[in-house]
Image (spheres, rainbow, N blue to C red):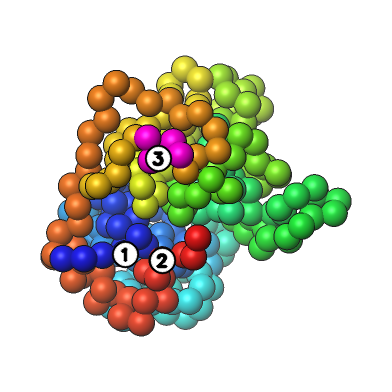
Amino acid sequence: MEYNTAELVAVMSSRVLEDNKTIFAGAGLPLVSSILAQKTRAPHLTIIFEGGAVAPELMSDRLPYSTNEVRTARKAIMIPTQFDIFSLQQRGYVDYGFLGGAQIDMYGNLNTTVIGPYEKPVVRLPGPGGANDIISTCNKIILSLHHMKRSFIPKVDYITSPSYITGGDSRRKSGLIFGSLYKVITHLCIMSPDEKTGRLKLEAVHSGVTPEQVQENTGFELLIPDKVPTTEPPTERELTLLRALDPEKRYITPKKE
């Protein structure tokens, strides 16, 4: 069964989510991946929205466009304030945070602020929203990006959301004493941070992709082990469920190069 790059990332992201855990999900790909996980291997995954809804029952093919609209609150067990939502997160009650970005560097830092100098940017991006809070205090962070050399660069133009900052123990020294980057999932591969240096390390490639191809599309030197496994392609069941969630392909349309 054929699939596009966005569908591949959604399926691979859903596979890393464990049952009986809590995820802070944004609308779009994080949301679709989270619901797909609920319908496959994590039926008791609890979804939390920045707008305030906790554990809603979302309807297939009627997914919310944003984290603040009424559809995010359908049959939610709680609808606290944004302040309360982030307070729960800061107290360690959120297992996963799921983010994307325009740029990512070798230490997993994200940029969603500007391309180019901050004072005179080439492009002004949407900004962090709650992304800085999420990456700073969720227990495990999943990052999802389209894999292009212009997005994977040695040093981001602006650190909107800090991961391992400059490597080593710089994250902890900055005051971010818990939470860490867990996986970076792209349409080419899965990466994770090296335990000692914080640098991104190739963990697995997707079917039909080689480590050399991943490196060719990365603007910095990846840590690549001698043996790199290949992920199992999306199954027909996973793709059928995913497409039922987003029949108009609002979220699972591949990005342009």
Does 214 lie within the magenta span? Answer: yes
**What's the residue at 59%, 40% (across, down)?**
153
Residue on which the image places disc 3: 214
Foreground residue among 110 and 256: 256
Residue on which the image places disc 2: 254
Task: Name which of mark 1 and mark 2 comes first in the sequence.
Answer: 1
How far from the left and from the top, in percent, is residue 216?
Answer: 46, 39
Q: Viewed as shown, does residue 245 lie left or right of 232?
A: right
Q: Decide whether the magenta segment is chiefly helix, strand or loop.
A: helix
Extreme residue in the right direction: 119
Name the kind of residue labelled 2 in the image: Pro
Q: Residues within 10 Å of mark 1 (few under 14, many from 20)?
A: few
**What's the residue at 26%, 65% (across, down)?**
3
How far from the left and from the top, in percent, is residue 157?
Answer: 70, 44
The span from disc 2 to disc 3 (Cα, nearest Å) is 18 Å
Q: Residues within 10 Å of mark 2 (few under 14, many from 20)?
A: some
Q: Viewed as shown, does residue 154 lie left or right of 11?
A: right
Magenta-colored span: 212-216
* Residue 134 visible at all: no
Foreground residue among 167 and 82: 167
**What's the residue at 41%, 29% (across, down)?**
201
Residue on which the image places disc 1: 4
Name the kind of residue labelled 3 in the image: Val
